[in-house]
Structures are given as C-alpha cells and as structure tokens.
Amino acid sequence: MQRKTLVSLAGGAAAVVAVGGIGTSLLSGTESTTALDHPTLKAKADGHEALSGTIVAARTQGKYHPLPWVGSEVSAVSCPDVKAVAGTKVTCTGESDGKKVSIPVTVVKASDSSVTWKFER
C-alpha cells in the first residue's frame, strides 16, 4: 500500500511540473503576430508598411516579465516603427532595476495583412 502511495505521489508531482513547464513556455513567449488591418496599428517606414512602435512597445513590456521566474520586469519601453519586411531589426529601449536596457526586435515574417515579430530578453 505504501509503495502505491509513493508511486501516485511521484506521478502527481511529475504531472504538476510538466504542466507548470508548459504554462511557463506559453506565457513567456517572445513572438507576437499583429494584424495590420486597423489604421492605428499601421505606420510607414522607408516607403513600406510598418507596425506602429507604440504597439510593439506595449506588447513587449507586457510580455517581458510574464511570471516572476521568467525575465526581469521592464518599464517605460519605447520602440521605433517596425518595417513589415522579414529580417527587419530595430532596438527598443526600456528600464529595468533603474538601468536602461536595449531590447532587440526582429521581424520573423510579414505580409500585407500582418507582421510576426519577436524580441530578445
């Protein structure tokens, strides 16, 4: 009976760890896809459609520190407009623990209707 209980407890603990790991992975993702179907999301950069830097900054700040054990909290994030061309790189700035931080952003893929981009912690 004792052996069954130990096996059950070990299995339960393994399940909790697995679910926690999957949840952390989902919540801590740094990639985002944004539709370009609303005028407030769009901008122009070098003659190309672009994603407003305000949108990139807000989403980056919100996702930078989703859980206490993933990344550092960041505030006052600002980003330039992000050209809707795959491979485009820009640098956002923010503050963390009273220090300025640079946050690299890269466009993963782009179309006429959306931009998929990611940031680095």
Image (cartoon, rainbow, N blue to C red):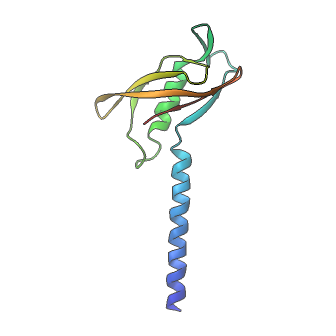
Residue 63 position, x and y percent, is 50, 37
Q: Is residue 120 above or below residue 49?
A: below
Q: Residue at x 55, y 79 (%)?
A: 8
Q: Is residue 90 above or below residue 69?
A: above
Q: Is residue 19 left or right of residue 37?
A: left
Q: Residue at x 53, y 16 (%)?
A: 81
Question: Hey, which quadrant is residue 40 in on the image?
Answer: top right
Question: Hey, which quadrant is residue 114 in on the image?
Answer: top right
Residue 3 position, x and y percent, is 51, 88
The residue at the far left in this view is 98
Number of marks drawn: 0
Q: Is residue 10 above or below residue 95?
A: below
Q: Residue at x 53, y 49 (%)?
A: 25
Can residue 78 be seen here? The reply is no
The residue at the far bottom in this view is 1
Q: Is residue 106 left or right of residue 99?
A: right
Residue 58 position, x and y percent, is 50, 27
Q: Residue at x 53, y 81 (%)?
A: 7
Residue 85 position, x and y percent, is 61, 20
Can residue 31 be seen here? The reply is yes
The residue at the far top in this view is 47
Q: Is residue 9 above or below residue 72?
A: below
Check the picture and name the quadrant holding the C terminus: top left
